[in-house]
């Protein structure tokens, strides 16, 4: 009952669509550097001494990046980092950095490792600097991913109740997947290297979860919309039908298998639930009341639990 559908719309994606700033992550898309493992953002060694290794008297190297091998240069949003290839105390010394689009560095002649990150996409390349000016380009092989979700019939979900998490497409031996980006807001563009990703869409905070495998293509924007089969439910304990909610009520929600999935306290118990059958147990002043109900996808409802002698349960039975 937790299955959903995915609608993918691939739109040609130019570099201008990637202008919004996105958090930096040092990706490991290696361009001809098969055994290289770059340090994390806080793990590289900074230059020692007052003189930078990026010298005005060295050779000029112009660096540019493209989404695809035939794409235009990216003009904004790139983070450039230049490293010496020899580790110092287990860390690669970073000798220069820049933000923006195409960048020009003055470096001492020699070999360097250049990393370009563009959101969560990135590429690494080994370059050689001489006294003569030269130009190097990095192909990021990257695209964009834009996520959204709706209810049955295309009803929009309030963005504040909807979040996405993006995982690696390939699971590890134990079945786990590496988390790439948590808490992605709907309709935000995430820059990623081309490939397949596992996307988890969560509506609310209980069990309305949809999982999908989505392919990101280089140079394109992939727009994916998943459909949640769920509804918003509000429960209250009342002494008569249509009556006021009784305060200081403890709530326990059970799924159709009898497993507890949510507990809360208050006059009202409001939550988003996936479609299916449930049992709600309300406890107030050592009296326990129970009611079975069904969630229908897209149909929000208010459920009243009657606090009457006839509806009351034996406390020991409720504890079981």
Image (tube, rainbow, N blue to C red):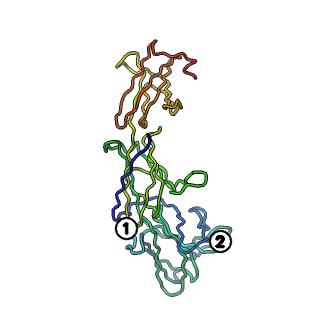
Left/right of residue 110 with respect to residue 136 in the rendered view: right
User: Dot 2: within a 10 Å radius of its alpha carbon, few (fewer than 14), some, or many (20 or more) residues?
Assistant: few
Which quarter of the figure has residue 188?
A: bottom left
Residue 28, position as x, y percentages in the image? 54, 66
Residue drawn 38% across and 73% down? 71
Q: Which residue is under mark 1?
A: 15
Residue 259 lies, with reference to residue 171, above or below; the image says above
Circle nearer the N terminus (1, 2):
1
Helix, strand or loop at disc 2?
A: loop
Residue 210, position as x, y percentages in the image? 44, 46
Q: 93 or 14: nearer the eye?
A: 14
Residue 59 lies, with reference to residue 140, above or below; the image says below
Circle 1 or circle 2, nearest the eye: 1
Residue drawn 35% across and 42% down? 151
Residue drawn 37% across and 61% down? 221
The quarter of the rendered structure image containing the N terminus is top left
Q: Which residue is under mark 2?
A: 87
The quarter of the rendered structure image containing the C terminus is top right
Residue 82 lies, with reference to residue 186, above or below; the image says below
Which quarter of the figure has residue 111?
A: bottom right
Residue 123, position as x, y percentages in the image? 50, 69
Residue 26 lies, with reference to residue 160, above or below; the image says below
């Amino acid at each position: 009952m937790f299955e959903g559908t995915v609608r993918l719309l691939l739109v040609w994606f130019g570099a201008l669509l990637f202008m919004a700033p996105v958090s930096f992550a040092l990706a490991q898309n290696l361009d001809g550097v098969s055994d290289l493992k770059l340090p994390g953002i806080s793990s590289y060694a900074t230059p020692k001494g007052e003189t930078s290794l990026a010298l005005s008297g060295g050779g000029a190297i112009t660096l540019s990046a493209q989404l695809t091998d035939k794409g235009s240069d990216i003009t904004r949003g790139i983070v450039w980092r230049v490293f010496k290839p020899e580790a110092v105390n287990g860390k690669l010394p970073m000798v220069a950095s820049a933000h923006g689009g195409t960048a020009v560095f003055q470096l001492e002649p020699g070999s360097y490792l250049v990393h370009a990150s563009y959101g969560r996409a990135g590429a690494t390349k080994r370059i050689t600097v001489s006294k003569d000016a030269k130009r190097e380009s990095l192909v990021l092989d990257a695209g964009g991913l834009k996520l959204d979700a709706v209810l049955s019939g295309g009803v929009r979900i309030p963005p504040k109740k909807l979040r996405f998490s993006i995982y690696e497409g390939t699971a590890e031996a134990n079945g786990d997947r590496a988390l790439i980006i948590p808490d992605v807001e709907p309709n935000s563009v995430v820059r990623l290297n081309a490939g397949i990703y596992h996307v988890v869409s969560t509506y609310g905070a209980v069990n309305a979860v949809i999982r999908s495998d989505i392919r990101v293509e280089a140079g394109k924007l992939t727009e994916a919309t998943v459909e949640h089969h769920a509804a918003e439910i509000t429960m209250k304990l009342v002494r008569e039908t249509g009556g006021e909610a009784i305060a200081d009520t403890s709530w326990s929600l059970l799924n159709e298998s009898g497993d507890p999935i949510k507990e809360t306290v208050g006059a009202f118990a409001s939550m988003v639930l996936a479609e299916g059958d449930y049992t709600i147990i309300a406890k107030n002043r050592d009296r326990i009341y129970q009611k079975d109900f069904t969630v229908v996808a897209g149909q929000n409802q208010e459920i009243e639990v009657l606090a009457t002698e006839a509806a009351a349960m034996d406390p020991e039975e409720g504890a079981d």
